[in-house]
Structure formats: structure tokens, C-alpha cells
Amino acid sequence: MSDELVTFFKALADSNRLKIIGLLAQQPYSVEELAALLDLKPSTVSHHLAKLAQIGLVSAKTQSYYNVYQLDEKALESKTKSLFSQENLAASIMDVDAGAYDNKVVKDYMRKDGSLKTIPAQRKKLDAVLRYVVQAFELNKKYSEKKVNEILSRYHEDTASLRRELVGSGLMKREGGGGEYWRE
């Protein structure tokens, strides 16, 4: 489906084609009429119309000696709904590595031994590091504060800040002051 999106946008990525669509939205025109209106050669207009017909936006009817082109508004509406559906937009990013940003940030902030050089000050970078650090904890397993500090000390000496940020960002839950911690 992403190929269809690219084809659709390529066909529309020309100002003259957009003008042709705008004109055809008002009324049908022949190639010669469009050429005169846009100050283009008829062969250039025919080329643009062929691109628009290829994606199903315009069609031609023969009237005496001329082909008269019209915008297929229903096709435009249908194609727009189809191409921009939630499923198709999601499919267009299937080959994108969603964790690429987090991986880059973690790589930038980690030493070779796996500890943090520093705790990031920027929220976005801190969140990326926290998403990495929280993976050291098993899901739905309860940890004492002492055990949490022991695990976090592998990453940075300021375990209190890391612990507070993990809870504050919702990546970990805490029961009472100094109680148990867990990851859901």
C-alpha cells in the first residue's frame, strides 16, 4: 500500500497537475482548452492528464473531435479514504525501526561496561534511557527498594533519581514509602 501512496503523491506533486485538477473540479475541459488556460503545449497537458488518469482521478469522454476530461470526484474521495485509512498509514511504516531513537540515545549515554555516563537532562532522552533501564526488571515481579537500588547501581550511582524517574514516568509502580516496586 505504501507504493500506492507514493504513486498517488508523485502524480499530485506537480503544480500544473494540481491546476488541472482544480480546473476539472469546476467543469470538464478538452486538452486544447486546458493548454490555453495553463499556457502549456497540448502534448504537455496530455502527459499530465495521462498521469492523473493512471491513478484514476480523471477520465475522458469523446465529444465530436475532442476528448473531454473530467475529474472523477467519487474516485478522488474513495481513493483518499482508502489511502489514508488507519491500516494503510500503519502499513506504510512497517519497515521503520521504532526503537532507533532509543537505541541511539542509549548508545550515546552508555559506557562500554553498560553504566550511564550521566543521567540525561532532556526529558526525551531521559525517557529513552529509562525505557532501556526498566528492562532489567521482570514484569509483575515485586522488588524491595534495596533490590531496586542494587539493580539500578549497575547503571548509575544516583539510584534515587533513577528510581524516582522510573516511578514518575509510569514505567514502574511503587507501594508506599520504601515499599515494594514492580514493573507492569
Image: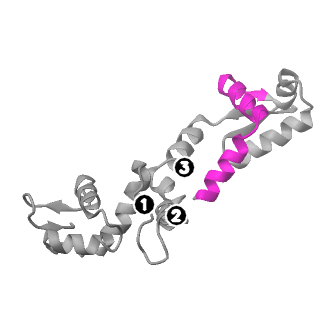
Q: Which mark is residue 83?
A: 3
Distance between the alpha carbons at the discs numbered 1 and 2:
10 Å
Amino acid type indicated by mark 2: Asp
Screen quadrant of the N terminus: bottom right
Q: Which residue was labeled with disc 1?
A: 118
Question: Is residue 49 rendered to the left or right of residue 145?
Answer: right
21 left or right of 79 in image: right
Q: CA distance from mark 2 to mark 3?
A: 38 Å
Which numbered tag is attached to residue 108? 2
Q: Are marks 1 and 2 in contact (CB under 8 Å)?
A: no
Upstream in sequence: badge 1 or badge 2? 2
Amino acid type of the residue that numbered disc 3 sits on in the rendered structure: Leu
- Image coordinates of residue 51 in percent, x first then y, are 76, 45
Residue ID at (70%, 39%): 58
| Residue 7 visible in the current orientation | yes
Q: Estimate how packed mark 3 is, as few (under 14), some (14 to 19) or many (20 or more) residues with alpha carbons within 10 Å.
A: some
- Whole-percent x and y of residue 30? 81, 29
From the viewer's perspective, is 151 left or right of 115?
left
Q: How many marks?
A: 3
Q: Is 126 left or right of 91, judged from the image as shown?
A: left
- Span highlighted in magenta in the image: 2-29
The disc, 3 or 1, on the residue closer to the chain's N-terminal end is 3
Tag 1: amino acid: Thr
